[in-house]
Image (cartoon, grey):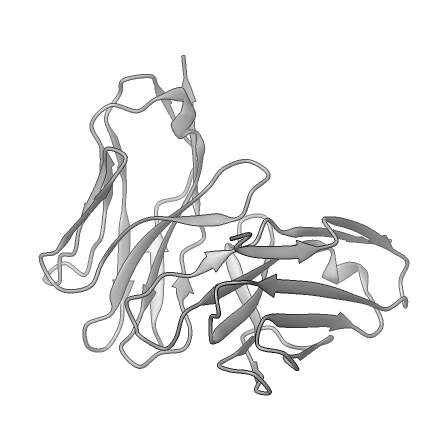
Amino acid sequence: GNSVTQMEGPVTLSEEAFLTINCTYTATGYPSLFWYVQYPGEGLQLLLKATKADDKGSNKGFEATYRKETTSFHLEKGSVQVSDSAVYFCASRGTGGFKTIFGAGTRLFVKA
Amino acid sequence: NAGVTQTPKFRVLKTGQSMTLLCAQDMNHEYMYWYRQDPGMGLRLIHYSVGEGTTAKGEVPDGYNVSRLKKQNFLLGLESAAPSQTSVYFCASRPDGTHYNEQFFGPGTRLTVL
């Protein structure tokens, strides 16, 4: 079945460091791919998405590129801030699918 | 727009008690979902609905029931609570079945079953 695997956390970085959170997926066809972010005590909110191969999603300095050849959608940010501390979820949804498949989440701590 | 709201925010139950969690959305969305979030396990789908009057089972439906009598509301019921149902519950909605549209999440309900 379809699945999403993302790197285990927690990830701890100093402010202004480079961030990568790896995400790979298995799916038939061409799913849409998403990154959601969950700040402490809140629900998830969409960070970015990509709907076809080679698309790049971007928002708030975060980027992720839909790589069909490696079935990956890694999240990157060039310079993290303390306010980026949160849990990040990678997710996929197939065409015609009712359900979104979520990864287990990666907790990010950014130190000042 | 309030978006997706959930009631209550916190609840403590004793084993065997029942309760209903309410989710409401004011975005006229067709699809609605209930998830539970447990440490290290991400989000697991309990039940979902693709329109008013419809419901379907997700990954972990046992011990839960749902109803979607009105388009804007999606209720999650626990008939006889068990400690294994201690979790944070999230409701979500999305406009329709278009595969690339995002889900909008509520703030969550933290449930403890003693």
Q: Is A70 in front, or is B93? A: B93
* Residue at (73% x, 62% y) in the render: B85
Number of numbered markers? 0
Location of the N terminus of chain A (image quadrant):
bottom left
**Drawn side of residue A18 relative to residue A56, left or right:** right
Q: Is A45 in front, or is B5? A: B5
> In this picture, is A95 found above or below A60?
below
Q: Is B32 in front, or is B18? A: B32
**Drawn side of residue B80 relative to residue A71, left or right:** right
* Residue at (90% x, 58% y) in the render: B14
Residue reaching furthest bottom? B53
* Residue at (70% x, 64% y) in the render: B22
Q: Is B84 in front, or is A110? A: A110
Residue reaching furthest front? B1
**Drawn side of residue B101 relative to residue A53, left or right:** right
**Spot occupied by residue B5 in the image (x, y as percentages of width and height):** 61, 55
Location of the C terminus of chain A (image quadrant):
top left
**Spot occupied by residue A91 in the image (x, y as percentages of width and height):** 35, 59
Quarter-wise, where is residue A53 in the image?
bottom left
> In this picture, is B84 found above or below A12?
below
**Spot occupied by residue A22 in the image (x, y as percentages of width and height):** 27, 45
* Residue at (35% x, 45% y) in the render: A7
**Spot occupied by residue B95 in the image (x, y as percentages of width and height):** 40, 70
Quarter-wise, where is residue A67 in the image?
bottom left
> In this picture, is A88 found above or below B19?
above
